[in-house]
Image: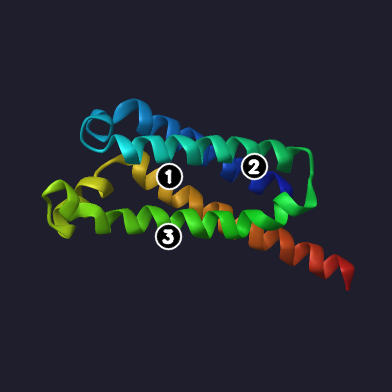
Amino acid sequence: MRFLLVNLSLGLSIFFAASLLLTDAELWAVAPDHAYALLVLMLLDCIMLLLVLRRKGFAIRFTQYWGAFKALLFLADILTAPQYGLTYLEFATYLFSLWAYNGLLLSQILITASGLNYMRSVKKAEV
């Protein structure tokens, strides 16, 4: 079950990233560098999911760090607001109004939590 949660959370991350890339026209028009970065992160999620599905131990252990890194990265995106002529509040309001962005951010928290939960269960089984 815990292994399934890791897979599901990575799958959700891929889904929400693809949704954001496909539905947010402003992302491509105003910040194509962010769009391409998100595309790379989504492709890395796909690779990570394939590795986890093949039950590669290092990949499963890495998911907790991967999710936390990406959650911080997506939150830090707000700090780029002046680059686009917006205040931090305006840009944060815009980002959090996008259902795909909210889902993407929540899926990173799920990746981190499910990775931690999986590793905790492995450590309990070893004891």
The answer to which of 105 and 59 lies nearer the viewer is 59
Question: Mark 2 Cα within 10 Å, few/some/many (few <14, many 20+)?
Answer: many
Q: Residue 121, position in %: x, y? A: 77, 63
Amino acid at the residue labelled 3: Leu
Q: Quadrant of the C terminus?
A: bottom right
The reply to whether residue 62 is visible in this rendering is: yes
Q: Which residue is label 2 attached to?
A: 48
Q: Which residue is label 3 attached to?
A: 72
Q: Is residue 111 left or right of residue 62?
A: left
As drawn, the residue found furthest toward the bottom would be 127
Question: Separation of disc 3 and disc 1 at Cα?
Answer: 12 Å
Q: Is residue 40 above or below residue 60?
A: above
Tag 1 or tag 3, which sits nearer the N-term? 3
The answer to which of 1 and 122 lies nearer the viewer is 122
Tell me the element at label 1: helix
Q: Is residue 67 left or right of residue 54?
A: left
Q: Which numbered marker is on residue 104?
A: 1
Tag 2 or tag 3, which sits nearer the N-term? 2
Look at 74% across and 38% down and name the residue there: 53
- Number of on-image labels: 3
Residue 46 occupies which quadrant of the picture?
Answer: top right
Q: Residue 33, position in %: x, y? A: 33, 39
Q: Residue 92, position in %: x, y? A: 22, 54
Front of the two marks 3 and 1: 3
Amino acid at the residue labelled 2: Met
**Pointer 3 with pointer 1, Cβ within 8 A:** no
Look at 42% across and 50% down and name the residue there: 105
The reply to whether residue 2 is visible in this rendering is: no
Q: Is residue 90 above or below residue 54?
A: below
Q: Which color mode does the image show?
A: rainbow
